[in-house]
C-alpha cells in the first residue's frame, strides 16, 4: 500500500481472555481508517461501551504495537515482542497500572486482497494476573 492517508476500512477486533478454566470472547466490529506515516502503520476506529464512545488509535511498527484509547476509557500502552511493559488503564471508576508480557507481535498486510491482521499477551492489572489475552485485529478496505 502506498504512502496514503485515511483509507476507510471495516475492522473486527476479537479478544480471547483465558484465566484458568474461565474463557471469555469480546468482539468489536467498527468502521475505521488505515494509513501509513513514516515507518509505522496506523489503524483508527471508535467503539461504544455502555453508551459511551471510545476512540482507538493502534500504531504498528517493527516488533511493537502502541494502543491509545480516549473517551469513556483512557489507555496508553506499548506492547513489545518478548518484553514486559507498563502502561495505564483508566475508567470512570478507577485507574490501574497495566503490566503486560507480550509473547508475539505479528502484523501482516496483503496488498492484493487489501486485508490486514495483527497479536497475544499476558495481562496484569494493579499487580494481579488477569489472564492471557489473545487479541486479533482483522481489517479490510471498505467497499466504495
Image: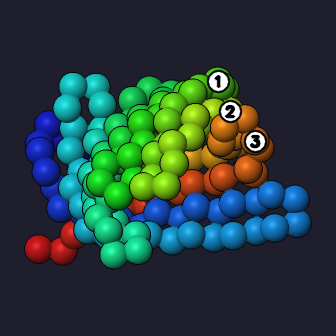
Q: Which mark is residue 128?
A: 3
Image quadrant where one finds the C terminus: bottom left
Q: Is residue 116 visible in this depiction of the protein?
A: no
Quick check: 33 left or right of 29?
left
* Residue that badge 1 annotates: 83
Label 2–label 1 contact, CB within 8 A = yes
The answer to which image quadrant residue 14 occupies is bottom right
Q: Position of residue 119 (x, y in %)?
A: 57, 46
Q: How crowded is mark 3: few (under 14 residues within 10 Å), some or many (20 or more)?
A: few
Q: Residue at x 66, y 38 (%)?
A: 126
Above-or-below relation of 61 to 45: above
Q: Position of residue 44 (x, y in %)?
A: 27, 52
Q: In this view, does 111 lie above or below 49?
A: above
Task: Identify residue for label 2.
Answer: 101
Mark 1: give few (<14), some (14-19) or many (20+) Cα within 10 Å.
some
Residue name at image x 29 percent, y 54 percent: 71
Q: How many other residues sit within 10 Å of disc 2, few (<14), some (14-19) or many (≥20)?
A: some
The tag earlier along the polypeptide, 2 or 1, is 1
Residue 140, picture quadrant: bottom left
Residue at x-position 65% and y-position 62%: 16
Q: Nearer the viewer, mark 2 or mark 3?
A: 3
- Measure the C-alpha gap from mark 3 to mark 1: 18 Å
Mark 3 or mark 1: name the one nearer the start of the chain. Answer: 1
Q: Which of 91 and 42 is in front in this view?
A: 91
Name the spot of residue 99 as percent of width and height, x first: 63, 33
- Is label 1 in a helix, a strand or a loop? strand
Query: Can residue 133 be seen here?
Result: yes
Which secondary structure, mark 2?
strand
Label 3 or label 1, whichever lies nearer to me, is: 3
Q: Do the residues labelled 3 and 1 touch (CB within 8 Å)?
A: no
Distance from Cα at disc 2 to Cα at disc 3: 13 Å
Amino acid at each position: 500500500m502506498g504512502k496514503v492517508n485515511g483509507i476507510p476500512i471495516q475492522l473486527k477486533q476479537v479478544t480471547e481472555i483465558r484465566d484458568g478454566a474461565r474463557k471469555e470472547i469480546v468482539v468489536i466490529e467498527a468502521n475505521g481508517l488505515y494509513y501509513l506515516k513514516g515507518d509505522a502503520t496506523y489503524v483508527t476506529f471508535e467503539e461504544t461501551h455502555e453508551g459511551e464512545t471510545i476512540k482507538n488509535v493502534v500504531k504498528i511498527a517493527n516488533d511493537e504495537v502502541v494502543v491509545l484509547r480516549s473517551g469513556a476509557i483512557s489507555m496508553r500502552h506499548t506492547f513489545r515482542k518478548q518484553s514486559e511493559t507498563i502502561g495505564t488503564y483508566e475508567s470512570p471508576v478507577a485507574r490501574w497500572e497495566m503490566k503486560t508480557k507480550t509473547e508475539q507481535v505479528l502484523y501482516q498486510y496483503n496488498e492484493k486482497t487489501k486485508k490486514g491482521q495483527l497479536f497475544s499477551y499476558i495481562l496484569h492489572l494493579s499487580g494481579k494476573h488477569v489472564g492471557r489475552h489473545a487479541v486479533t485485529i482483522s481489517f479490510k478496505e471498505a467497499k466504495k
